[in-house]
Structures are given as structure tokens and as C-alpha cells.
Image (cartoon, rainbow, N blue to C red):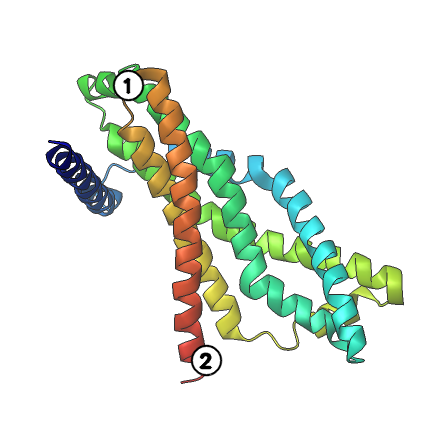
Amino acid sequence: MKTIAKKYLFSKRMDSYLEGYYKGYRFCLRFFKEAFIPPFHWREIINQCFEVGLKSLSLITLTGFIVGIVFTKQSRPSLETFGAVSWLPSLIGIAIVRALGPLVTALICAGKVGSSISAELGSMKVTEQIEAMEVSAINPFKYLVVSRVLATTISVPILALYCSFIGLLGSYYNVYSEEATSLAIFYKNAFSNISFLDIFSSSVKSIVYGFTIGIIGCYKGYYASQGTRGVGKATNQAVVLSMFLIFFEEVVIVQIVNWIRYF
């Protein structure tokens, strides 16, 4: 009997996982369908860009500046060992522009923006506000989901670019305190080994991260259930799943870019 019960529980969990994947697949397909069909809620998209972008600016600024300082401090002793301190700006520029800027921005937005989107939509779902919008002849998916996903897809790349700039500024602060290097020379050396492919790959990564954060947060909130407890569970799942997918996408995109670089 115990063996039969275990097999039943395993089968039930597998069915639940597969159903979740299928619902997520249908959710993404519906987004791409609704995103290109009028009417377009431009005012709501702009409002969500404000919520995602400007309200995250202070946190991105502080985090990016600290990342630049800390990474520079950690890299200096290793370069001093080989007598290559002059390569420090170039090393920091490559590391921040290629990886740290987009990745740090995405992780911050996954925790701040993704949780906020999931909690907001989840609260609307359990209080039946979404059903009320359907009764009022408003397409809740287009108004709530499409606008938020487009906002994160647009805002995260801009925030990533800003974070990279602030990270380099933090690095310059550390370099200036040690060597009194001018800002112009620092940025010239930092961008000396950065190619168009680096900028392009960072932009693509940021767009993918932004879409992932928006679609996961909306999906978990849109299908939240079991009252306030379900909202908290959906919010937690949105953050964890977004971060996991961000790291997975980072690995995949880096492999593709390296293949293009050495092709």
C-alpha cells in the first residue's frame, strides 16, 4: 500500500509540474499574441516604466557604485602580484560591461520588481478584481500583463546600462584614491578592449532578463490562489524562479557569444 501511495503522489506531482509548464507556455504565447493586437495601453505602459525604472534608480545607483568599488579592491592585489596594475581599468570595464552590470541589475529587479508585480496581480486575483475587469469589458491580460512585461523589457536594459556606468564610476573612485588617475584616461582605458559584440550581447541579455522578470512575475500573480497565503507563495516563487532563469540564461548567452567571438 505504501508503494502504491508513493507512486500515486509522484504521479500527481509530475502531472502538476507538467500542467504548470503547459500553462506557462500558453501564457507566453498569449502575451506575444496580445502584444501586437490593438488597443495599446500606452499610458499604462509608461506608468509601469516609471514604477520599474525610476523607482529602482536609487537602489541600482547604490548597488552599482558599491560593486565597482569592491570588485576593484578585490582585483588590485592580484594584478599587483604580476605588475599589471595599469590593466585594472580595462579589466573592470570588461567585467562590468560584459557581465556584472546586466546581471546585478537583473537580480535587483527580480527581487524588487518581480515580487511587486506578482504580489500586485496576486492580490487582484484573489480579491476577484481581475474578474471584475472582464465583466467591465476590459481585457485584463492586455492591460495588466502585457503592459508590465513590456515595461520590464524596456526598463531593465536602460537600468543595466546605467548600472554599468555607475559601476565604472565606483571603480574610478577607488583607482583615483590610489593613483590619482584622471576620469577621461580611466574611461578611455576601461573601454579600450570593449567591442561592439560586448555592447550588443549585454543589451540582448538585459532584454531577455527584463522579459523573464516580467513574464514570471505576471504569470505567478495571475494564477495565484488560496487567498493571502497563495499570494505570498506566488511572490516567493516568482523571485526564486526569475533568479534561477536569469543565471541559466546568462550561461546560455555567454556560450553563444563566445562561440560567435571565436568563430
The total number of labels drawn is 2
Q: Seen from this angle, which residue lies furthest bottom?
A: 263
Quarter in which the N terminus is drawn: top left
- Residue, disc 2: 261
**Residue 39 lies in what quarter of the image?**
top left
Q: How crowded is mark 2: few (under 14 residues within 10 Å), some or many (20 or more)?
A: few
Residue type at tag 2: Arg
Residue 151, visible in the rendered structure? no
**Residue 34 lies in what quarter of the image?**
top left
Mark 2, secondary structure of its residue: helix
Query: Residue 226 shows which numbered tag?
Result: 1
Query: Residue 197 shows which numbered tag?
Result: none
Relative to 86, residue 24 above or below: above
Residue type at tag 1: Gln
For marks 1 and 2, the one nearer the N-term is: 1
> At 41% across and 49% down in the image, what residue appears?
244
> At 25% across and 43% down in the image, what residue appears?
31
Q: Is residue 205 left or right of residue 40?
A: right
Q: In x, y percent, where is residue 60?
A: 61, 44
Between 18 and 136, the residue placed more toward the observer is 18
Q: In x, y percent, where is residue 5?
A: 14, 32
Relative to 189, residue 218 above or below: above
Mark 1, secondary structure of its residue: loop
**Residue 169 lies in what quarter of the image?**
bottom right
